[in-house]
């Protein structure tokens, strides 16, 4: 690892008795970038993040954060981490400001400095007027923003965001995106997990997609879309039965669901015109490809436990 690499993983493995959740994965996170870990439920992404966060030891392989092995130096690493967990684990017995001040004690931040940082954070996340409010008085979006703000108290070198906008409305989600964009300008490094593909495309410089404990692809969002799907996608429902033989004859890549066919083609505009005229009985649409198309193409469309 060099000074420009914050996290490095080689053959990282985590097993629980007879079950292996993470199966020998390799990845690295560069300083100042937002690195995403995507995957369906049970893919191993949360286990990976918990190992990086020093909350769970690795079974095998190499995992270093800030040039330190996580199994040997968890205390030193945690001091430089900020973690925004999936759960809103705020203390209901403390008000908004007190939640921040008490949390600051875990990092041995002096009282005067803790108050200064707490006020700055409350301004940053738009909750300065709520500093004396009880946690139960906050909306769900406010609580989520407070959990996010709390993760900034120790001015972390690596900020781990585990489903940071889960449960937020579109306005709240975009606010968090703005916070991340602003923090990136100051050099903060991010490790992000999310189920929102738009969020990953918006925030991540690079990402991996995991499935069944393994990495199935890695790269920059735009490059993954271009290389694995193409520019456009055609979605067809209510199609004639001779459409599939036509696609197979042309060698066009497509996916079939019980209600529609999803078509990936580099010449999709030409195909859209031809297909809509010859084979489409109901709805036929042409749209730009996105990261969700990549995700579903690689991990499948079936529900996973």
Image (tube, rainbow, N blue to C red):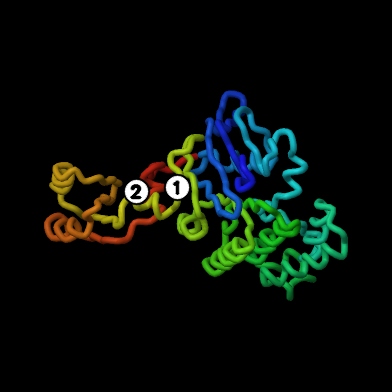
| Residue in the picture at 50% in, 58% down | 199
Q: Which residue is mark 2?
A: 227
- 209 or 130: nearer the eye? 209
Q: Is residue 209 left or right of residue 183?
A: left
Pointers 1 and 2 in contact (C-beta within 8 Å):
yes
- 18 or 124: nearer the eye? 124
Q: Is residue 201 left or right of residue 282?
A: right
Residue 174 sits in which quadrant?
bottom right
Q: Residues within 10 Å of mark 2 (few under 14, many from 20)?
A: few
User: Eyeballing the image, is 90 above or below 97?
Assistant: above
Q: Which mark is residue 288?
A: none
Q: Is residue 221 visible?
A: yes
Q: Is residue 259 left or right of residue 69?
A: left
Q: Residues within 10 Å of mark 1 (few under 14, many from 20)?
A: some
Residue 217 x/y as whole percent: 43, 42
Q: Which mark is residue 219?
A: 1
N-term-proximal mark, 1 vs 2: 1
| Residue in the picture at 76% in, 65% down | 96
- 58 or 304: nearer the eye? 58
Residue 195 x/y as whole percent: 50, 52
Residue 22 x/y as whole percent: 55, 33
Q: Secondary structure at mark 2?
A: helix
């Amino acid at each position: 690892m060099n000074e420009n690499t914050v996290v490095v993983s080689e053959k990282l493995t985590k097993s629980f008795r007879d079950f292996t959740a993470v199966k020998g994965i390799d990845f690295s996170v560069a300083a100042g970038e937002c690195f995403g870990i995507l995957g369906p439920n049970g893919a191993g992404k949360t286990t990976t993040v918990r190992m990086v966060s020093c909350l769970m030891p690795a079974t095998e392989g190499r995992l270093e954060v800030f040039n330190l092995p996580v199994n040997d130096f968890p205390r030193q690493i945690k001091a430089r981490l900020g973690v925004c967990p999936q759960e809103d684990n705020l203390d209901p017995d403390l008000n908004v400001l007190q939640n921040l001040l008490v949390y600051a004690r875990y990092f041995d931040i002096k009282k005067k400095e803790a108050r200064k940082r707490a006020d700055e954070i409350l301004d940053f996340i738009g909750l300065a007027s709520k500093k004396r409010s009880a946690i139960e008085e906050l909306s769900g979006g406010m609580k989520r923003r407070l959990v996010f703000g709390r993760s900034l108290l120790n001015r972390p070198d690596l900020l781990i965001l585990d489903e940071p906008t889960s449960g937020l409305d579109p306005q709240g989600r975009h606010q968090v995106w703005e916070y991340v964009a602003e923090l990136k300008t100051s050099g903060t490094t991010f490790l992000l997990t999310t189920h929102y593909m738009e969020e990953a495309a918006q925030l991540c410089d690079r990402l991996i997609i995991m499935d069944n404990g393994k990495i199935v692809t890695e790269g920059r969002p735009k490059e993954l879309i271009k290389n694995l799907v193409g520019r456009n996608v055609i979605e067809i429902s209510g199609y004639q039965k001779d459409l599939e033989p036509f696609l197979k004859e042309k060698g066009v890549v497509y996916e079939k669901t019980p209600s529609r066919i999803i078509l990936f083609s580099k010449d999709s505009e030409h195909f859209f015109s031809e297909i809509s005229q010859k084979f489409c009985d109901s709805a036929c649409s042409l749209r730009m490809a996105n990261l969700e198309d990549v995700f579903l193409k690689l991990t499948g469309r079936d529900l996973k436990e």
